[in-house]
Image: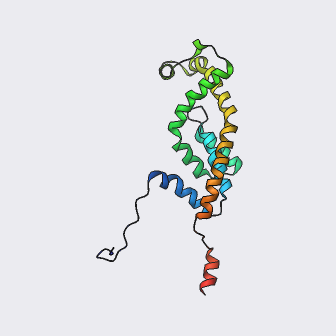
Amino acid sequence: MTAPADDQPAPPPRRGFWRRRLLDPVVALLTQGVTPDKVAATLAVGTACAMFPFLGTTALLCLGVGLWLRMNQPILQTLNQLLGPLHLVMILAYVRLGEWIWRAPVEDRFSIIEVITAFAELTFRDFLARFGQAGLHALTAWALTTPLLIAALYYGLRPVLRRAARLRPRIRPAAATATVQS
């Protein structure tokens, strides 16, 4: 295979969305001295926070928990945004699981259309009176499943990230490079 006529190297292949937005930042952290275990913990805790079953609260929860545990905020917030569609699905799943845990009567169940319509028509106080119990159900289910989710993700991601850290190219510090060259 010959080089292009102008002796310019071929452009690098285009990287996909997930590689640019998730994989590359994680690999960059691993090359900056952040341990694979810390990245795994950040991804696990970030996922759990991103699944908190109340709309409009997950970014603040990720921020607060990340500051408290000294976790990487860009990873937490990126993960929170990427998991947005799953978060919407999980709200209803948490409500239904909470109803089962609390043994809520079947006649108290509602549809998503009902919630959207009520949110548009009712005052905030009336909305809370109608759906507050569902919030308690969802919160209960989230609180009970979160430790399992964090453990599964942490222990599942740790070996993968450790392997990725071993495979990454070794980068020498600038001072060591300057000493070797002189």
Q: Mark yes or no: residue 63 visible.
A: no
Question: On the picture, is 2 further left or further right than 15?
Answer: left
Q: Is residue 164 above or below residue 18?
A: below
Residue at 58% across / 51% down in the picture? 75
Q: Mark yes or no: residue 103 visible.
A: yes
| Res. 142 image quadrant | top right
Residue at 56% across / 27% down in the picture? 92
The residue furthest bottom is 182
In the foreground, 41 or 60: 41
Residue at 52% across / 33% down in the picture? 88
The residue furthest front is 1
| Res. 33 image quadrant | bottom right
Residue 146: x and y in percent read: 67, 37
Residue 1: x and y in percent read: 33, 73
Residue at 40% across / 59% down in the picture? 14
| Res. 59 image quadrant | top right
The scheme the figure's colours follow is rainbow
Q: Is residue 31 above or below residue 73?
A: below
* Quadrant of the image containing the C terminus: bottom right
